[in-house]
Image (tube, rainbow, N blue to C red):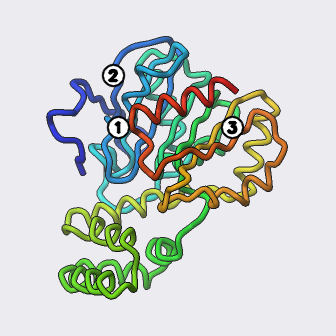
């Protein structure tokens, strides 16, 4: 599903087919031989990440990659197939090789669900990724609704029932908000994800495709220990006012990795939307000045 209006799409998007998947990506400008691989948020276009090309202080070539079922990224055979981290990691190597960039390592940026994807890739290949920046990263706390919907037969039945009865579901969503039974945030979240059949199917296929990209805390902690031992820098940034991915989501992993060098957790004055230029400059200044 395409989320970028035509007027803001990059002039050059490319695709790479690998492991039964097509991956769409864009390179705004060519920089050095080493790449930064960047992942956007859910229901957003890859263009959201292109500003990093102009503010990253090291000489890099930015590659923004569309997540599964965003843009033209998706399985070559229709369905809700999971994308394994190893397949995604190998596909990235294929993209780097096709673009004539270094294939022995890259930097990594992920925002929101793109942060969970980046986290999964970091776990799959801890020392391949040099500097890793995760902003408002999903992946530390699995919402019960997501768990039931994605991983159970009942959840599948319930989602498709809601798709068939979307108008009724949306009316109840409005009523519950009016009666104070759900928050403004939850009301908006429900309405956004249920607004059309196309969006509901994109949510379903997207959630199912990402279900293998969710590493366990023990695997995350081990990857961070390996990275710390190799001197690889890792920064995780959370917004103090973020109601979608609040900072306390990371408490467990902070306890498990307490005292590790080259690992930093930042809480900034922000909600979930961190991709504004002034915030990006503040984030870059923070991670490169410590």
Circles 1, 3 touching at the beta carbon (< 8 Å) = no
Q: Can you see residue 86?
A: no
Q: CA distance from mark 1 to mark 3?
A: 25 Å
Query: In this picture, is 193 found above or below 266?
Result: below
* Foreground pick, 21 / 184: 184
* Residue to which mark 1 is pinned: 48
Label tally: 3
Q: CA distance from mark 3 to mark 2?
A: 27 Å
Q: Residues within 10 Å of mark 3 (few under 14, many from 20)?
A: many
Secondary structure category for the residue under label 2: loop
Q: Would residue 194 be found to the left or right of residue 96 on screen?
A: left
Q: Which mark is residue 264?
A: none
Q: Which mark is residue 126?
A: 3
Q: Residues within 10 Å of mark 2 (few under 14, many from 20)?
A: many
The mark nearer the N terminus, 1 or 3, is 1
Q: CA distance from mark 1 to mark 2?
A: 12 Å
Q: Which mark is residue 28?
A: 2
Q: Residues within 10 Å of mark 1 (few under 14, many from 20)?
A: some
Q: Nearer the viewer, mark 1 or mark 3?
A: 1
The mark nearer the N terminus, 3 or 2, is 2
Query: In this picture, is 141 found above or below 274?
Result: below
* Foreground pick, 23 / 240: 240
Q: Residue, x 48% and y 44% (percent of image)?
A: 111
Q: Residue, x 37% and y 84% (percent of image)?
A: 180
Q: Nearer the viewer, mark 3 or mark 2?
A: 2
Q: Nearer the viewer, mark 1 or mark 2?
A: 1
Where's residue 187, x and y in %? Answer: 33, 73
Circles 3, 2 touching at the beta carbon (< 8 Å) = no
């Amino acid at each position: 599903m395409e989320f970028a209006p035509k007027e803001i799409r990059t002039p050059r998007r490319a695709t790479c087919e690998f492991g039964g998947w097509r991956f769409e990506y864009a390179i705004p400008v060519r920089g050095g031989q080493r790449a930064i691989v960047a992942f956007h948020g859910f229901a957003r276009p890859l263009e959201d990440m292109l500003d990093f090309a102009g503010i990253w202080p090291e000489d890099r070539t930015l590659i923004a990659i569309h997540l599964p079922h965003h843009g033209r990224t998706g399985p070559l055979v229709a369905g809700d197939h999971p994308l394994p981290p190893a397949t995604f990691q190998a596909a990235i190597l294929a993209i780097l090789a096709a673009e004539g960039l270094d294939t022995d390592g890259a930097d990594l940026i992920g925002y929101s669900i793109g942060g969970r994807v980046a986290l999964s890739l970091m776990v799959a290949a801890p020392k391949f990724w040099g500097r890793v920046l995760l902003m408002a990263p999903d992946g530390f706390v699995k919402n019960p609704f997501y768990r039931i919907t994605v991983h159970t037969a009942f959840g599948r039945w319930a989602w498709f029932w809601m798709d068939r009865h979307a108008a009724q579901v949306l009316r109840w969503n409005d009523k519950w908000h009016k009666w104070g039974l759900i928050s403004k945030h939850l009301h908006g979240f429900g309405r956004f994800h249920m607004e059309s059949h196309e969006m509901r199917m994109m949510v379903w296929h997207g959630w199912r495709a990402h279900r293998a990209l969710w590493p366990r805390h023990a695997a995350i902690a081990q990857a961070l220990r390996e990275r710390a031992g190799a001197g690889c820098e890792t920064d995780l940034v959370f917004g103090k006012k973020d109601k979608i991915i609040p900072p306390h989501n990371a408490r467990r992993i902070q306890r498990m990795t307490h005292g590790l060098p080259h690992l930093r957790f930042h809480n900034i004055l922000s909600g979930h939307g961190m991709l504004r230029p002034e915030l990006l400059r503040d984030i870059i200044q923070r991670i490169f000045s410590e």
